[in-house]
Amino acid sequence: MSMVSCLVVLVVSVAVATAVGSVNSSRFDELFQPTWALDHFTYDGELLQMKLDNYSGAGFSSKSKYMYGKVTTQIKLVEGDSAGTVTAFYMSSEGPNHNEFDFEFLGNTTGEPYLVQTNVYVNGVGNREQRLNLWFDPTKDFHSYSLLWNQRQVVFLVDDTPIRVHSNLEHRGIPYPKNQPMGVYSSIWNADDWATQGGRVKTDWTHAPFVASYKGFQIDACACPSTVAAAENARRCSSTAEKRYWWDEPTVSELSLHQSHQLLWVRAKHMVYDYCSDATRFSVTPMECQHHRH
Ligand SMILES: *[C@@H]1O[C@H](CO)[C@@H](O)[C@H](O)[C@H]1NC(C)=O
Ligand SMILES: *[C@@H]1O[C@H](CO)[C@@H](O)[C@H](O)[C@H]1NC(C)=O
Ligand SMILES: *[C@@H]1O[C@H](CO)[C@@H](O)[C@H](O)[C@H]1NC(C)=O
């Protein structure tokens, strides 16, 4: 590479990294606040733990709302008997036409595998569940769970391996979630009416408290002041000729070839349920399933 092209690359990467409005932090207390059952939290400046017992679950939310970017947290799920419990990590906007991108970790009896359920709500409508098991035991170590969101796709990632893509198919008349700022949330609660083996296995409270552990919070996204209208935030958070945001770069507009292969592997080896192929539930295949490449 010549000196001249080196310099150009350097200048471009600096301009992307310092885009106005983008936040990038890792401390829980800078980014988030407990919103449910403060007395069910412990936090030592790095490790955060939330517990569920027969009195309460717990939850936290981001202090800001965001449009586009990537949010990641490392989670170590409830060890041992976690049957009946659900731990969720998700982004959501507010109101009756809200959008939402969900990771829900469904606990199990000791030694049996967790299920990861993902869902996407667009304009208040969900019913887009997918379920998979993981290629590791998520209770033994911390693993990173991320949501990447831009105007082209929403990607769910586990240790940077894509497990789900929801593509923008607006050109086919299918609504895509892109105009509402979203908060980042997590919670743990009792869902023994449905979560484990279809609700047959109930929470065994003698094994409480059920503890989910977190660290390594990362939000690299465009913060949206609540005083600014959604449309104005969408404009602020989109790239222009003068300011380029990394989430609008072609490299994150679609999966790389390597990532596509990873996703195919996950779907072939680990997926146990996909709403797209549930003919008993949907007599007509949902529109986006007919067009999704994945
Ligand atoms: C945000 O932080 C991550 C991890 O430290 C880093 O890889 C990324 O380049 C940062 N992004 C920006 C826009 O500064
Ligand atoms: C729990 O384990 C059983 C038996 O291996 C499995 O069928 C089920 O999918 C697992 N997960 C949940 C959430 O029930
Ligand atoms: C919660 O569980 C503990 C231990 O099993 C028990 O002693 C207590 O009575 C329970 N409390 C409620 C409100 O159910």
Image: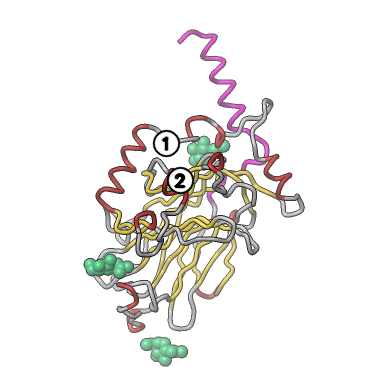
Q: Position of residue 87 (x, y in %)?
A: 43, 66
Query: Image point 34% across, 69% down: which residue?
Result: 107
On the picture, is 189 further left or further right than 203? right
Within-10-Å neighbours for mark 2: few <14, some 14–19, many 20+ = many
Q: Position of residue 230 (x, y in %)?
A: 71, 50
Q: Position of residue 25 (x, y in %)?
A: 56, 47
Q: Residue furthest right?
A: 227
Q: Can the viewer see residue 130 in this picture?
A: yes
Q: Is residue 279 magenta?
A: no
Q: Residue furthest left?
A: 111
Above or below — where is 74 with respect to 255? below
Asked if labels 1 and 2 touch by Cβ distance under 8 angstroms, the answer is yes
Assign a secondary structure to mark 2: strand
On the picture, is 293 further left or further right than 31? left
Circle on res. 105: none
Q: Does the Cβ of the disc 2 residue fall within 8 Å of ligand 1?
A: no
Amino acid type, residue under disc 1 in the picture: Leu
Q: Report which residue position mark 2 lands on.
A: 155
The quarter of the displayed image where residue 209 is located: bottom left
Q: Report which residue position mark 1 lands on.
A: 255
Indicate which disc, 2 or 1, sits on the residue closer to the N terminus.
Answer: 2
Q: Position of residue 242 (x, y in %)?
A: 69, 26
Amino acid type, residue under disc 2 in the picture: Val
Q: Is residue 4 magenta?
A: yes
Q: Nearer the viewer, residue 209 or 282?
A: 282
Q: Quadrant of the N terminus?
A: top left
Question: CA gap, disc 2 to disc 1?
Answer: 9 Å
Q: Does the Cβ of the disc 1 residue fall within 8 Å of ligand 1?
A: no
Above or below — where is 205 with respect to 129? below
Magenta region, residue range: 1-26
